[in-house]
Amino acid sequence: MAGRIPQAFIDELVARADIVEIIDARVPLKKAGREYKACCPFHDEKTPSFTVSPGKQFYHCFGCGAHGTALGFLMEFDHLDFVEAVEELAARYGLEVPREGGAPAPDDAARARSEAAYAMLQSACDLYRRWLKEHPQSQPAKEYLKGRGMSGRTAHAFALGFAPPGWDNLLGELGGSDEARRALEDAGLLAGSEDGRRRYDRFRNRIMFPIRDRRGRVVGFGARTLGDDTPKYLNSPDTPVFHKGRELYGLDRVARLRERLAAIVVVEGYMDVVMLAEHAIPYACATLGTAATPEQMERLFRAGADVVFCFDGDTAGRRAAWRALENALPFMRDGRSARFMFLPEGEDPDSFVRAQGAAAFEAQMARAPTLTEFLFEQLRERADTRSAEGQARLKEEARPLIERLPDGTLKTLATRRLADLIGLSLDRTEDALGLRRPGARATRASAGGTRAAPGVASPARRAVTLLLHHPELAEAAGDVKDIALLDTPGAGLLAELVEFLKNRPHLTTAGLVEHFRDHPQGRALMRLAGGDPPPAGEALDTELRDCLERVRREPAEARFQELRQRVRDGSASAAEQREYAALAQARGAAPG
């Protein structure tokens, strides 16, 4: 396992990257003043609202809100994870990606073995395809595929193949040297006896389904038996280039569909994916024999915001759906949706679409319950909400699930739905779950006048925005160690940004947000960076210093407002009355 990529290298890489060049190679840009524009690649539009700023090295869409750096664009557009995007960008500039944390980067020999494994997998794929067409024992495979209603066009599109009966067909064709046999081994294409003395073809008398990563490289195979061998479906083992819990069969094809997808549908088998494509539903992919893992969830939602999980309608299908729901919860940020579709008993996607057609399948998708609908449907089956005991049980069953949702609107709405079911107010339900609505503290405090009015940025937020768009302003901030100690929302982050930027005055907006990508407030910083920039000018220095002073005064102001309210309603102690009088005198206000 490779170690962590040093942050200093990521900073250097982002500083070297030209976001205009990177995006223009994928989405043609047009010059518009100091910036560049295009129709957004992430949503349908006729008037360009997608803007790329070479100064900030940042992109932002004013239509759908998509925003980010060169790395972020590669992740979203090419459907890469962060490490893959770093490697892609580094390769563009001829840089070697270093590693740290005690685990060295792959050496030349290890990289060469991985490349040899990729090449061998592709060679095996080509050979399996040729054997499906030409091998004298391939007729049962052809008849099986035709019997399922598959056209030659679809079989060709998915590069289906055939592994003949026998122990050494592949080994005999491709294992002509020690290096080749080692590559076959590294690729997971050979199996062996328990004593290790005999090596032979892993896949025999099976229809072969090549599994590709998001770059389109063959990384493994799924294989369906044509005889009585078990298991009926067999996957490649985990190898240095293939991890079953990471890949999804067919996701590489879905990712290449540049048109806006209504949804990505996740099914349970290779044939389901292939046969849905046969019937003009090309946006299906499949897990590799297990419930979708967290890593697969991240890849699914990176490829599309709306995911439909399709299961058989029996008890086993509903258990699998519940496991998928549990794994999906942490990834349900606002703007994403998940549905859970159940087919009639005895049907799978293949049989359903052959019998009723694509329109009926898509109609079933549209009627599928959402994640929260399915969640509460299942929870209500476990607890009778007509009794107080049942309501209490429902609350306890729901607590760990709702806690796993990211903070945002969906979490609030799920809590509100629970509140309705157990007969409590939203506030009391949140208290019972130990949750706090985003912004609730600020809303309550604003009644005392210590928080910004709706639509008006707090001093800390305004200062952070200034620094994001004009990092060079940090030099005007002065000493902020006192701000770092304040218990004011945003004060700690503000002080952290100032201290970080003082020694990096020439850092771009992109470099700053990438450095803070994994910070707890990284997403918030990315959103602020995507907004309209403050106008440049000397007055920004003064504005930043003013914001910092207002942040420093906020705790005293909050305490003053709290004490004034207690004095007015008669709940203040004698000590609190004296404290209030002193604060009022210090700020020149009349007590009362």
Image (tube, helix red, strand yellow):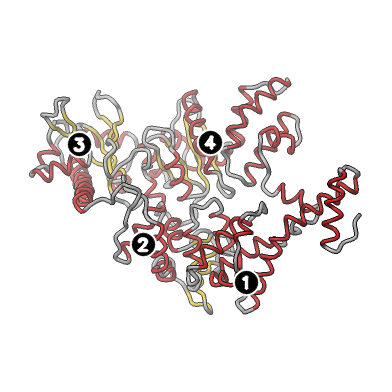
**Residue bearing mark 4:** 340
Among the 4 quarters of the image, the one containing residue 452: bottom right
Distance from disc 3 to disc 1, alpha carbons, whole Å, reads 63 Å
Q: Which mark is residue 163?
A: 3
Local SS, label 3: strand
Question: How far across and how far down the image is residue 124, in percent?
Answer: 19, 44
Horizontal side of 358 relative to 547 (left or right) equals left
- Mark 1–mark 2 Cα distance, whole angstroms, equals 30 Å
Distance Cα–Cα, label 3 vs label 2? 38 Å
User: Could you classify mark 3 by the number of other residues whose Cα lies within 10 Å: few (under 14), some (14-19), or many (20 or more)?
Assistant: many
List the residue tagged with mark 1. Answer: 534
The kind of residue on which mark 1 rests is Pro
Of marks 1 and 2, which one's residue comes earlier in the chain?
2
Mark nearer the N terminus (2 vs 4):
2
Q: Is residue 435 left or right of residue 73?
A: right
Q: Nearer the viewer, residue 27 or 65?
A: 65
Q: Is residue 405 above or below residue 232?
A: below
Front-lying residue, 411 or 355: 411
In the structure shown, which secondary structural element does the residue marked by tag 4 occupy?
strand
Q: Earlier in the sequence, mark 3 or mark 2?
A: 2
**How many angstroms separate mark 1 from mark 4 (CA)?**
44 Å
Q: Tag 1's secondary structure?
A: loop
* Residue identifier under label 2: 89
For the point 13% across and 31% down, the residue is 167
Q: Residue at x 58, y 32 (%)?
A: 400
Q: Nearer the viewer, mark 1 or mark 4?
A: 1
Alpha carbon separation for disc pair 3 and 4: 35 Å
Tell which circle, 3 or 1, labels the residue nearer the N-terminal end. Answer: 3
**Residue 39 visible in the displayed image:** no
For the N terminus, the image quarter is top left
Between the residue at mark 2 and the residue at mark 4, the CA separation in whole angstroms equals 37 Å
Q: Residues within 10 Å of mark 4 (few under 14, many from 20)?
A: many
